Amino acid sequence: MGDTIRIRLPLRHAGFTLDLDLSLPPRGISALYGPSGSGKTSCLRALAGLDRVANGYIAMGDEVWQDESRQLFVPTHQRAIGYVFQEPSLFAHLSVRGNLDFGHRRAGRPSTVDTQAIVGMLGIGALLDRRADALSGGERQRVAIARALMSRPRLLLLDEPLAALDSARKAEILPYLARLHDTLAVPAIYVSHALEEVAQLADYLVLLGDDQQVHSGPLPPMLARLDLAAAFSDDPGVVIATTVAAHDDTDHLSRLDFSGGQLFVARRPEPVGHALRYRIHARDVSLTRVQPEATSILNVLRADVTGMTLTDTPAYLLVRLQAGDTALLARISRRSWQGLKLAPGVKVWVQIKSAALLG
Amino acid sequence: MLSAADLGALWLTLKLATTVTLLLFMLGTPVAWWLARSRSRWRHPVSALVALPLVLPPTVLGFYLLVAFGPHGPIGVLTQSLGIGLLSFTFPGLVIASMLYSMPFVIQPLRNAFEAIGERPLEVAATLRAGPLDRFFSVALPLSRRGFVTAGVLGFAHTVGEFGVVLMIGGNIPQSTRVVSVQIFDHVEALQYGQAHALAGGLMVFSFLVLLAVYGSQPRLRSF
């Protein structure tokens, strides 16, 4: 089943050309992340065949959708994609049920599509007989996602599906997207300029920078790269994959293991063995040269300093650390860096003030 | 109150307006679709051509049609070679003339409706496996049905109300080209004011009701 998604697109913008040359993994969510105007949506539209980019090449495994060297261009309606637009775009003349059935029927109502499960997963069972224009923005977007899934796509394309929603609606939909990520076999490409969404959902990251440079790779190492720190400067930090290892019901804590150490967090309801994804913000990480003995911080790890870069604020630096296989970032002051005589190779104690659960 | 001739004229008018409206739907819809979506440089000349009957006196249109339909006109030569004979002073000729005259009243509302849909619903439909024709019938048509109501009502009513073109190329032949507006003119010329009143008043009430229906069917300003 696993077919790599090949994309070669010379995207022409006002004043520059962005040469996208990507191979995206055939499963999980790949995020296209970058500032507005960096070509994210153009790439997605070209993938869907909504725009025809000159000299482009797009293939989904062995199925070629565009190859201009052969004058080949498969029109949108013949590509097995699901597309969720930025603003909820339901058909106003159809009910929710009619909207859901639109693509499902044209895909031949395949028996492999579990419509009940999709409706349940997106929590829209109670809306089926409502008119599309009688729904809230968040509900519409959930219906739009379900509608895309029911057409049995081989590739799901999501163009900033949360951008048009207020933060309450975003918070309403994110868990559904996270659930989608956990249960869905279909690969998805998620366009976003919100680091928070990307950190929460993506497995693979394509970074479209201001400088027309494209960087891509699995998400956790990408987030920990100092040379890309400028792109994540709003909120630098890493994502770590952990497994629930033990529960301590006396202190109401759970122990999570990850390669490189362990993390204590407030008691989790998940059973031992369950995978959880955590984000550790650089601002929540502090460093000491000697092992802290009397500290209220629960999570203290041993790590090596592997690098340092400047930040937008002259007083602060971003330090990269390695604990086992896991890279961490810490935001510390320039004075601390000098005072602690830190340098690459120095061993430090890392204090993690808090970790945010993702998904 | 209404004579047999009046009723004949009424029936003919209804027949003409219905035929013209249906034909304009069939021929005008593709033109309106093209005008709404094309970026061709011919878009503006065609728009102007379609709107021309709005500004021309009906006599100008009627005059040129009369010439074209005539024995030496391009259409006349064609129809004669096809063995149909001449179209002037016949019902089919009247239909063609009325279609030209009422064309902007059908095409313009359709074009506005198609433009109001925008690109997005059609793109959505394409991503849901709908081909071009499928997109037109399952998305564009239902989303522009108000435009079709407006276009139909205006095209029908405008055909009922025409006079100049009919007089120029239709003449005044009972059961064939004598429509209500011409019949009223005859009554007035013959000083039969009572009968003129009945028909003219009827036409006025009809037109009022038609416009009321159009305005009533327009959506109120809704916030999206």
Image (cartoon, grey):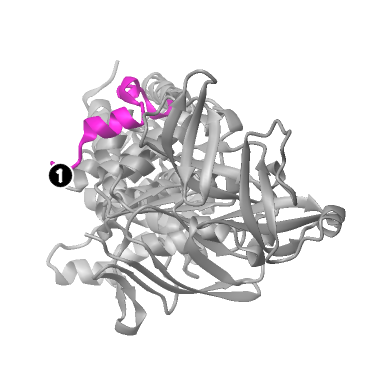
Q: Point out residue A195 in the picture as x, y percentages from the top left corner.
A: 59, 49
Q: Residue at x 12, y 66 (%)?
A: B83
Q: Is residue A131 magenta?
A: yes
The residue positioned 35% from the left and 33% from the top of the image is: A93
Say whether residue A57 is left or right of residue A326: left
Give the residue number, with chain letter if any, for mark 1.
A110
Residue A350, image x and y in percent? 67, 47
- In the rendered view, would you say A95 is above or below B93? above
The image shows residue A247 at horizontal and vertical percentages of 44, 27
Please state the chain letter of the residue tagged with numbered disc 1 in the rendered image: A
Position of A252 relative to B29 (above/below):
above
Q: Residues within 10 Å of mark 1 (few under 14, many from 20)?
A: some
Residue B194 location (% of width, % of height): 39, 18
Foreground pick, B73 / B196: B73
Task: Residue A216: tell me if it is visible.
Answer: yes
Relative horizontal placement of residue A95, taking residue B218 as reference (left or right): left
Q: Residue furthest bottom?
A: A69
What is the quadrant of the N terminus of chain B in the image? top left
Q: Is residue A35 visible?
A: no
Find numbered disc 1 in the image and state the secondary structure of the residue it sits on. Answer: loop
Vertical placement of B88 versus A209: above or below?
above
Per the rendered image, the range of residues in magenta is A109-133
